Image: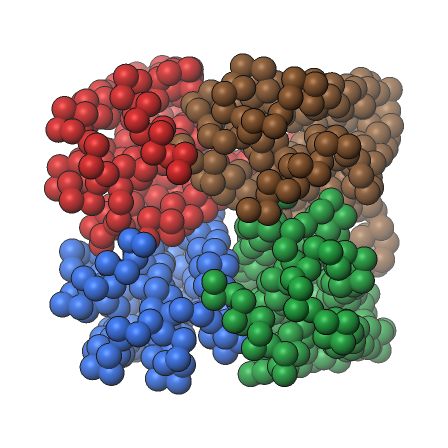
Chain colours: A green, B brown, C red, D blue
Amino acid sequence: MTKARIEAFSDGVIAVAITLLALDLHIPDPAKPGTLTHRLGEQWPNYAAYLVSFLTIGIIWINHHAMLRRLVSVDHAILVLNLVLLLTIGVLPFSTALMAEYLKAAHGENLAAVIYGGSFLAMSLAFFAMQQHMLVAKQHLLHEHLTPDLRRVVLRRNATGLLPYAVATLAGILTPYITLAICALVAVFYALPGTTSDVPKQTGTPQEESDRA
Amino acid sequence: MTKARIEAFSDGVIAVAITLLALDLHIPDPAKPGTLTHRLGEQWPNYAAYLVSFLTIGIIWINHHAMLRRLVSVDHAILVLNLVLLLTIGVLPFSTALMAEYLKAAHGENLAAVIYGGSFLAMSLAFFAMQQHMLVAKQHLLHEHLTPDLRRVVLRRNATGLLPYAVATLAGILTPYITLAICALVAVFYALPGTTSDVPKQTGTPQEESDRA
Amino acid sequence: MTKARIEAFSDGVIAVAITLLALDLHIPDPAKPGTLTHRLGEQWPNYAAYLVSFLTIGIIWINHHAMLRRLVSVDHAILVLNLVLLLTIGVLPFSTALMAEYLKAAHGENLAAVIYGGSFLAMSLAFFAMQQHMLVAKQHLLHEHLTPDLRRVVLRRNATGLLPYAVATLAGILTPYITLAICALVAVFYALPGTTSDVPKQTGTPQEESDRA
Amino acid sequence: MTKARIEAFSDGVIAVAITLLALDLHIPDPAKPGTLTHRLGEQWPNYAAYLVSFLTIGIIWINHHAMLRRLVSVDHAILVLNLVLLLTIGVLPFSTALMAEYLKAAHGENLAAVIYGGSFLAMSLAFFAMQQHMLVAKQHLLHEHLTPDLRRVVLRRNATGLLPYAVATLAGILTPYITLAICALVAVFYALPGTTSDVPKQTGTPQEESDRA
């Protein structure tokens, strides 16, 4: 299996999932009562959940590429782990729509928030499992300049990234708003300059170099 | 026709089909009676069918790549056979949704299961037909290291893979649960390490080597 | 603009359009009366229209690649003509669903058939316009081995391909069944070995050769 | 991050968004009163909005490629800016459907038009921000032949392109028809030969040359 095709397929799935999110932005029925301003305003949970999920999927895409960049070749186990990761990304349009629909509902909002936070946690866990498998079990498939120290730094950063989603998931038991807020903060944090969860800044340069070939 | 573009198009169709599966995970209407826990629980056939179909499409993607990897170039017949294969993959969101909707219904569950198992069988048959056409009729388009023995092993493995889906399809006449269970087992089996339906383990190495160029 | 990216984008649009067709295969509501067998049987226009459109889009994809293969580079006019072609492909899920919904309806079936045939005609016209623009106006962007004779053969074959769709469109005024039958025959004809609408058989070899690089 | 994968992912998102637009072309219910001719005719705002959005997304895709072509490599900031641009493209199916649904409605048509024009303005602003960031802050990532003069010309053209969308957005306060007309004119203008918003004609040649490698 060439690296190129696992990238192409993953890009495809992630691109479709991120764009399908928009299907949950509903058009209010003009025949029903209420001004459009009011009715679009009521849908703010949809916009908020959309924004957070869009950014989060976008960032996982960036990290996914950084992860695959370290590989020279792929094997069956990596393909299957990647498939599990794509599965967790593929359900995000569902968990996002669930969160949007129930955030202000009279009941079910806690379960929806736990599922929403939990789906991000599942995605991060799948990412971490794939990263660890590559860096620990499949070192012969990696580019040579990845020293044990560098590998440890990458894994530690990945593991740290699991924490906020675990907290966000648990917080859903109290109130869905904290779940949404934490997930939003994580997305914004990783979008800021110099904060990829994956490539440590001090070691980014040699890898960037190897990309330009 | 270059191999690159048939791969790109197939990756696109498979990526869209696998991601569209999530459109059948419905959000319960908050205005209707019943707790969210209960109503999501009721939807377990949707989650089960989603999981099985997602994994199955993912594995057919892996096998598809292994199949195309043997080719040096493609011709019109291979393109059309590939189109038929993509057609069988493209209907999986429909047959999956049908299975999910009727698994617990008062009637129609047997037909739904036969269609569900049958759509996987059709996909496997299309895959086998394409594989056989390439390995038997179009040997001049293949990489040179594919000996007649190796070709026979690949085809026999492919043919064996048809059996469980034939059984799963027939079992739908009795009960849809056996159909779903067999399809799930097939998906898990091929996801396990060292069990691709396509590339025999003992001969994988030379092909892996040729990929790294 | 590199050729690679116009191919990638076109592949993406065509792959999404061909897969979205399945969204019009509806799941009968289990709560409503009628056996599943009967109700799926009633939907045969959906399956027929789905099959015809799937094959037709697949074949236009094959021809699209054959067309672009002749190019060395692309310019703004080719990009815009390609965009118009993708537009005509992008509406096929709509015209297919319209045909499926109205084929057996008490009224509107003729208009639906004219729109269905007309959307294939529009697609063929857009294809022909792009082909002609490339072969006549932009010869400096083509591979050198395309002699004037070969260019004329390709264009004549393309123009001939417009005829059946024109007839199918007009036939919709009489009955939608002839429209569907003609479109089906065209799709099957081009799927048969050695009948691409685009690359004349006798001249295929040198082009195939240039692909293998 | 290689340029190839940011292109592949962007192509994917843009291809899905442009094709999802067709989901808002509704099939009239045959069981409801009214001839099909009449009822399709009533939907003209959907077709108009579809056409304008399809062309606009297609043109932003052309410009996107022209923008990325100047890059040798990408960094985290460019990836995030690109993600914001894709976000503005991803919401276009929503704002297009909103415009189509409310253009002829008794109320809400002005807000819908402001959102429609505003979503194109947001897309142009995101494009401009990414362009400026690349050309001003990240000159070390660019191809060498981009002189300061050329960079200034490109940015000035980009900034000029913001004006019509700002006017279209404001015009929505008066009437949605002017908004739609301006957006249509912009799309047609950029589709005409020799009017890309991005690459000045007089300097196009050296860049075209560099593409053919």
Query: Where in the figure is residue A124, as x and y percent of width and height?
Result: 74, 66
Query: Where in the figure is residue C38, as x and y percent of width and height?
Result: 66, 19
What number of labels is visible? 0
In the picture provided, is A92 more to the left or to the right than A166?
Answer: left
Residue drawn at point x = 65 percent, y = 62 percent: A143
Q: Quadrant of the N terminus of chain C?
A: bottom left
Classify residue A187 by image quadrant. Answer: bottom right
- On the question of residue C100 being in view, the answer is no
C190 vs B149, nearest the viewer:
B149
Residue drawn at point x = 47 percent, y = 74 percent: D78
Query: Where in the figure is residue A188, as x and y percent of width and height?
Result: 61, 80
Q: In the rendered view, would you say C193 is above or below C97? A: above
- On the question of residue D207 being in view, the answer is yes
In the picture provided, is B47 more to the left or to the right than D202?
Answer: right
Q: In the rendered view, would you say D26 is above or below C27? A: below
Residue drawn at point x = 77 percent, y = 71 percent: A148
C62 vs A172, nearest the viewer:
C62
Residue drawn at point x = 63 percent, y = 83 percent: A202
Q: Quadrant of the C terminus of chain C?
A: top left
Query: Where in the figure is residue D1, as x and y percent of width and height?
Result: 53, 67
Q: In the rendered view, would you say A200 is above or below B199? A: below
In the picture provided, is B184 more to the left or to the right than B142?
Answer: right
A122 vs A155, nearest the viewer:
A155
Classify residue A17 by image quadrant. Answer: bottom right
